[in-house]
DNA sequence: GCGTTGGCTTGATCCATGTCAACCGGAACT
DNA sequence: AGTTCCGGTTGACATGGATCAAGCCAACGC
């Protein structure tokens, strides 16, 4: 299958490079805040674009690390495995987000990244990113912010896992998804889940039955309408209230 | 108040700089892998050393961020608060570890850092660290590794909170502490906890009673000897076995 | 020496979530 | 159209850890 990315514009005189400068996610992604000239230098190092089919691994725990990955389109999950077989989903990533930051530490990936739908990623060789960010202050700073944001996000998940009850966790999860879809120009109130109940449960530290029951409960209360993976949020404030409720 | 840092050595001919180059934690901390000349340049930007008394805040959630902090001596916890009053300890930090990385993202701290014993920290102005790491490749790379390590650590905590049961969590916690004390040249088998049962519980997503019961259980089983905050590990393998036990 | 305080331990009971099991419904294949 | 399979839903029951409550111990002040 050839390139099926809808460009939403006529291709006229210039050759369109498959790179940051013509990516509509650039303000969500690594190039945030760069000048045109800087953007072109970043383009130079993002040579590889790769398609990952639904269910395939982008990388696996234990593999040598050499690149981080920006999601151009699609949806991923990352998970870690314990020796005894237990595993936990550590995150769901969507377009414009970076994957692979965990690998910098030991130069080996420490988790698996798996596409939840057919996806496209840009591979960014990490040593070249470091070189370039020594020259482009904005790039350096923004990259630091992205890593820091990941740490803050993880703290949020720790909070969720450590102190919230099942329904609060699911409400927080839905609100978070909604907010991230909004940031990408999609509806904040209606979306398709790319992951199964089991994957949601793994992320939230719950069993799939508990997730399912919580969905049903939310539906009974009129907060959402669920039909399998199709979610419509009917009462955002109801969901928010659920979270701040108990002391 | 003038400089009150006890130098613990005679000052003879050379002036002793209160900086990385004469800090015995440097191989655990930011200066890892730097040459002597590079070390001196790092020294230049670590001008402020500060004492934090037990119970005092190094920083609070919401405060403007401008520095990260290296712990020279002592012991800290970080915690996040929810609006409704619930809070969660997100980590315990000891000498050689960095605090404040969460603040880079929004330029405001997102958690509280509180000293659990009288401590001493080195403040590292972040914009100057970025400048210097644009010039010193080793510093840049090591800093990235430290941030990435924090992300990996957080994934470990997520795993712990999401999939482990109470006794596994506590065993993992003790083994982790033991390993970090060892890395600092202390006994791996005997140490004092700096935090209360409640703080341990908050970190592990458990109530203090559950933590207490698990300690008692471990003692009955002969894995450890507990007397209040004094812990002796009698059977490391017993603790390790506890963790990998169930599928 | 004695009371007070804060942190810790232990017991009894409760409840949220896990576990086990049955069933449902849509998608893919024959 | 029928079969299989996978993911989801729902119910009945079990249980790990929370909750509530009492008491203990060590440090500290008077």
Image (tube, coloured by chain):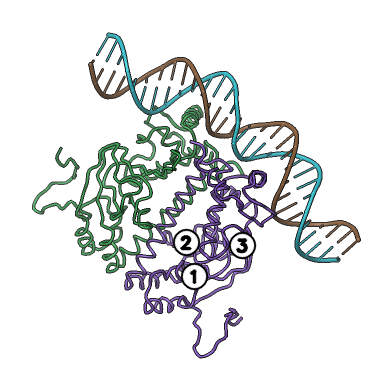
Chain colours: A green, B purple, C brown, D cyan
For the N terminus of chain B, give its image quadrant.
bottom right
Q: Residue at x 44, y 78 (%)?
A: B43
**B230 in relation to A191, above or below:** below
The subunit carrying tag 1 is B
Q: Are marks 1 and 2 on the same chain?
A: yes
Q: Position of residue A214 (x, y in %)?
A: 49, 31
- For the residues labelled 3 and 2, the Cα–Cα distance comes to 23 Å
The subunit carrying tag 3 is B
- For the residues labelled 1 and 3, the Cα–Cα distance comes to 19 Å
Residue under label 3 = B116
- For the residues labelled 1 and 2, the Cα–Cα distance comes to 27 Å
Mark 1 is surrounded, within 10 Å at the Cα level, by few (under 14), some (14 to 19) or many (20 or more) other residues, namely many
Secondary-structure class at tag 1: loop
Q: Are marks 1 and 3 in contact (CB under 8 Å)?
A: no
Residue under label 2 = B108
Residue under label 1 = B25
The subunit carrying tag 2 is B
Mark 2 is surrounded, within 10 Å at the Cα level, by few (under 14), some (14 to 19) or many (20 or more) other residues, namely some
Q: Are marks 1 and 2 in contact (CB under 8 Å)?
A: no
Q: Nearer the viewer, residue A142 or B90?
A: B90
Q: Position of residue B175 (x, y in %)?
A: 54, 52
Q: Earlier in the sequence, mark 3 or mark 2?
A: 2
């Amino acid at each position: 299958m050839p390139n099926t990315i809808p460009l939403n514009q006529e291709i006229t005189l210039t050759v369109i490079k498959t790179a940051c400068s013509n990516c509509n996610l650039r303000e969500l992604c690594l190039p945030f805040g760069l000048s045109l000239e800087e953007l072109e230098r970043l383009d130079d190092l993002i040579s590889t674009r790769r398609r990952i089919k639904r269910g395939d691994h982008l990388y696996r725990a234990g593999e040598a690390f050499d690149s981080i990955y920006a999601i151009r389109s699609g949806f991923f999950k990352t998970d870690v495995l314990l020796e005894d077989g237990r595993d936990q989903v550590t995150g769901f990533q969507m377009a414009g987000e970076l994957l692979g930051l965990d690998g910098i530490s030991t130069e080996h990936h420490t988790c698996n990244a798996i596409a939840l739908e057919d996806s496209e990623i840009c591979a960014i060789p990490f040593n070249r990113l470091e070189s370039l960010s020594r020259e482009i202050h904005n790039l350096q700073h923004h990259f630091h912010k992205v890593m820091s944001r990941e740490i803050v996000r993880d703290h949020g998940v720790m909070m969720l896992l450590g102190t919230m009850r099942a329904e609060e966790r699911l409400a927080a999860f839905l609100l978070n998804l909604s907010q991230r879809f909004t940031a990408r120009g999609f509806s904040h109130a209606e979306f398709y889940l790319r992951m199964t109940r089991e994957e949601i449960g793994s992320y939230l530290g719950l069993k799939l039955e508990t997730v399912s029951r919580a969905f049903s409960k939310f539906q009974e209360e009129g907060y959402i309408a669920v039909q399998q993976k199709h979610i419509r949020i009917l009462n955002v404030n109801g969901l928010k209230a659920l979270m701040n409720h108990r002391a």
